Image (cartoon, grey):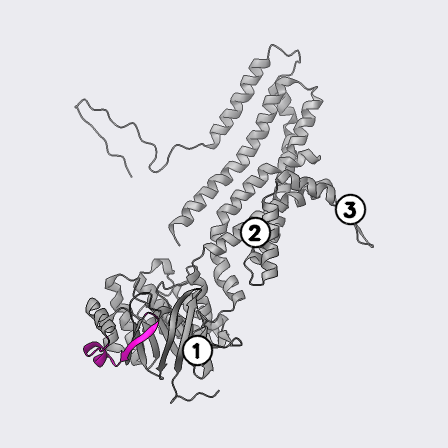
Amino acid sequence: MNWTPDQPMVSIKNVHKAFGELEVLKGVSLDVMKGEVICIIGPSGSGKSTLIRCVNALNDIQQGSILVEGQEVNDPDLDKLELRKKVGMVFQQYNLFPHKTALENIMMAPVRVLKRDKSQTEVFARELIKKVRLQGKEDSYPGELSGGQQQRVAIARSLAMKPDIMLFDEVTAALDPETVGEVLTTIKELAEDGMTCILVTHEMGFAREVADHIYFTDGGLIVEHGPPKTFFDKAKDPRTREFLSQIL
Amino acid sequence: MARPEFKTDLPVMLAPPERRQGEPLRIKLWHGIALFGFCVLSSTYVFADDTQAPASALSVLVKWMPLLLSGFLFNIVISFCSMALGTIVGTALGLGQISLIPVVKSSSWFVTQFFRNAPWLVLLFFAMFLLPFEFDLGFVVIPFPDWVKAIIGLSLPVMANVSEVVRGAVRSLPSGQWEAAESLAYTRQQTLWLIILPQCVKRMLPPWMNLYSILTMATVLASVVGVSEVMTLTGEALAAEGGRTDLLAPFYSFVLLIFFVYCYPIARYTVYLEKKFAVKD
C-alpha cells in the first residue's frame, strides 16, 4: 500500500487486545499525523502501555487494524524487523545493554542491524550524544550513569536508527524527580524538530506543553480526547474530570 | 583503615584485637596441610607398636608419592576433557532449551532433565559398558580406551548441568533486554549472540566453576571402572606394600589433601567472583 504524508502516519482502528481472559483494549481508535505529538494519559491498568507496544508489534492484537505508514501491523506475514526500523521505542526501565558503553549502545543497532558504515555511524552517534547533552559520557557504561543519563542514552540509541516515529512508554516514571526535567527537555527538543511522537506519560504539565493532541484512556477505551487546552480546561467526561482533579 | 587505640583507666573490657577488616575467620590452605600432617603423624604413632616393618609409614608414602601424583594428574586430565566436552555439548543443549522450535525445546529439555537426575556413577557405567572399545570406520579403527569412555561418561552429567546453567542465566536476564533489542529490529539470533549471551557469561562463571570442582572430585569414580587414576593407584600401592593397615590413613589422607589443595582455591575464587559480580549489574 502506498502511504503519502497527508495520510495518518499511524492509524489505529478498533483495536482489541486481551491477555488470556483479561481484556485490556476494547476497541481503541486514534490517528497520528506526521510531525504530530500525542500524549496518552490515564490511570494505571487502562491499557496505555499495551496500546503503544502494539504499534511496534511487541504485543500482538486480536482484532482491529494498526497501519504504520500504510503497513498493516495486524498481519501474520508482517515483517516485524522492517516495521521496527521505522518505529523507535524508549522504555520506562531504559533497558540499555549493560555490557556496552553509551557510544556502543547507540552504534550497535545501526551497524549490526542496518549494516551502516561504522565510522559514519560513529560520527552520527557522537552528534546524538551531543544532542542529548551527554558529551564526555561516550565511554561510560550504563551502570556508571544516573537514571536520567541512561534514559537519554536510550533515546539517542533509538534515534540512531533514524526512525520515523518514536514511542515513549512512561519514560520518566522510574526517574528521580530532579532528573525528570532533563529527559523531558530532550523529548521536547525532539518534538520541536518535527519528530512524530506517541507518549504515554503521567507528566501532565509536560503533556499540556508539548502535545498536539491528548488521549485519555480508562478501562481499555479512549474516553476523551482533544487538544491540550480544551482537554485540560473543558473536559466533558466525568471520569476524565475525576482523574484530572486527582492528578492536578 | 587504622584501628583506633583505646586507652582507659576505667575497669572496662576492651575489644579483643581485631582481625583484618572485613575478613572473617576462614579456612586457609595451611589448615588443610596441618590437618594432613596431624593425620600422618598420629597414625604413625598409633600403629608404631603394631608393625614389624622397618620402614615408617611416612617414608613409604614418600616413596609412592610420585606415582600417586601422576595418578592425580590423570584425574585432572579427565576432569579437563570431561568439562570441555560437557561444556560444548551442554551449551548447545542449553540454547536448545530456549529455542522457539517446540521439538528442539522439548527434546533438549528432556535430555537435560534425564542426565541431570541420574547418579554420576550409573552414567559412568552406562558409558563404560554401552560404548564399544573401538570404532571401526571401515578405513580406520579408532580405539576407545577406558579412560576415554570415562571422560564421556562423566561429561554426560556435566553436559546436563551446563545446559541448566545456560538456561538459567538466560532466564535470569530482565525481559527488558529482549524487548529493547526487539524494538531495535535485532533478529533473535543477533539478540542472543550480541546482547544476551555476553551478559550471561559473567553470571554463568561461578556455577560453572562450582560444577568443575564437583566434577574433579567425582573423577575418582573412574577407579570403580578400572581407570588408573589416583584412587586406583593408591589401592595398588597399598596392596604392593602388603596391606599394612598403618598405611591406610596416611595414604588416603594424602589423596584427600591433594584434592583439597586443588579444589579449595577454585571454590574460593568462585566465591570471590560471585561477590564481585553481585555488586554491579
Image location of residue A171, percent across then percent down: 32, 67
Q: Residue at x 52, y 66 (%)?
A: B188
- Residue at which label 1 appears: A64
Q: Is residue A189 left or right of residue A51?
A: left
**What mark, if any, has residue B186 been given in the picture?**
none
Q: Residue at x 47, y 76 (%)?
A: A74
> A67 or B241, which is in the foreground?
A67
For the residue labelled by badge 2, is the local secondary structure a helix, a strand or a loop? helix
For the residue labelled by badge 1, is the local secondary structure a helix, a strand or a loop? strand
Q: Amino acid at mark 1?
A: Gly
Q: Quadrant of residue B5?
A: top left
Q: Residue furthest left?
A: B10
| Same subunit, tags 2 and 1 | no
- Residue at which label 3 appears: B134
Q: Residue at x 42, y 49 (%)?
A: B277
Mark nearest the camera among 2 and 1 is: 1
Q: Quadrant of residue B67?
A: top right
Rate crowding at label 3 as few (under 14), some (14 to 19) or many (20 or more) other CA atoms within 10 Å: few
Q: Which residues are magenta?
A: A219-237
**What mark, if any, has residue B163 been given in the picture?**
2
Residue A189 is a magenta residue:
no
User: Do callouts 2 and 3 mark residues in contact (Cβ within 8 Å)?
Assistant: no
| Same subunit, tags 3 and 1 | no
Mark pair 3, 1: CA separation:
64 Å
Number of numbered discs visible in the structure rendering: 3
Image mark 1: chain: A
